[in-house]
Image: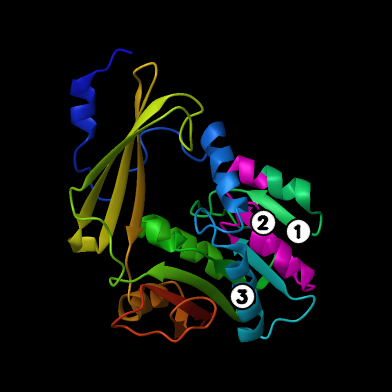
Amino acid sequence: MNVDLGQIGRIDTRPPLFAPHGAPFWDDPWIGQSMLAAHLDPERDSASRRHATIDREVAWIVERLSLKPGDAILDVGCGPGLYCERLAQRGLHVVGVDLSPVAIDYAQRHTTAVTYRRADYCSPGALDGLGSFAAAILIYLDVGVLSDEPRARMLANVRRVIKPGGAFIFDVTTPRRTWPADGARTWSASDGGFWRPGPHLELTRHFDYPEADAHLRQTIILDQRGTASVYRIWDRAYTPATLAPILAAAGLALESVRGDLVGTAFDESSSTTVGIVAQVT
């Protein structure tokens, strides 16, 4: 293996806020299959939450919104359809949207009771033509990965397809969540794993961006050919107070605040996540 240490040094640095991945992520077939396996693991909070938690979240959402059979609901960032299938089993008309071709292919092959579309939900018009919905959901902290402009486009897309009086439900990290220290590094060697099917090195470094309440986990993968690829997992923290004006600008009112999406009470001094019910105004 020929390793360009200069290249590693150049990319193992603090990038600009919300810099994108340096290599294909959603379109990478191997990473896509690794993500799918993580989604489908019922006992692990990874790409999706544990399936028992998903069951509780679906039950709470249906009860909280008084959804009834025949109502239409949109799952934005649906992955392989874990929420979609459970919602459809309750008699709801369900549409799921996700960017991952592997996840959408799996979802389409495993149920005919849900309509799926592969799309980037932050792209203008990505949800057009799917109909109108009593509610939309975006679950497992995905709003936190978005910078300002994609977040605004996502909210505009969602707002446009929700019926008057309908709701948008999502969850985000709060400033009470703890992360590894700014600059913290870890490394590991693998004969094959999440990132690559063959031998590779994984070099991970964490960065804080306090001006945006954001944290970055930056991972460099060095494969057996000596190729270095960089992946960036962002998370931005919010509070109900910081979310309210963002939602208002999109035509949504912050209607309810919980500590999660199973209905736990929210405590600003200790809750590491916040579950939001926003209503179309």
Residue 233 in the magenta stretch? The answer is: no
Between disc 3 and disc 2, whose residue precedes?
A: 3
- Is residue 169 shown left or right of residue 147? right
| In the image, residue 135 above or below residue 207 | below
Callout in the foreground (1, 3): 3
Q: Residues within 10 Å of mark 3 (few under 14, many from 20)?
A: few
User: What span is colored magenta in the figure?
Assistant: 76-104
Under circle 3, the secondary element is: helix
Asked if the residue at tag 1 contacts the one at tag 2, i.e. Cβ–Cβ closer than 8 Å, the answer is yes
Task: Give the label on residue 101, or none.
Answer: none
Between residues 191 and 179, which one lies in front from this camera angle?
191
C-beta proximity under 8 Å, tags 1 and 3: no
> Which residue type carries mark 2?
Gly
Residue depicted at 77% across the width and 46% down the height = 109
- On the image, the x and y values in percent for residue 265 come to 44, 87
Question: Which residue position holds label 3?
Answer: 56
Instruction: Give the residue type at disc 3.
Output: Arg
Q: Position of residue 186 (x, y in %)?
A: 27, 42
Total of numbered circles in the picture?
Answer: 3
* Residue position marked by numbered label 2 in the rendering: 81
Q: Where in the figure is residue 181, as x and y percent of width and height?
A: 20, 55
Instruction: Report the amino acid beneath label 1.
Output: Val
- Tag 1: Cα neighbours inside 10 Å, few (<14), some, or many (≥20)? some
- Mark 2–mark 1 Cα distance, whole angstroms, equals 8 Å
Can residue 37 be seen here? The reply is yes
Provide the secondary structure element on which disc 2 rests.
loop
Per the image, label 1 sits on a secondary structure element best described as strand
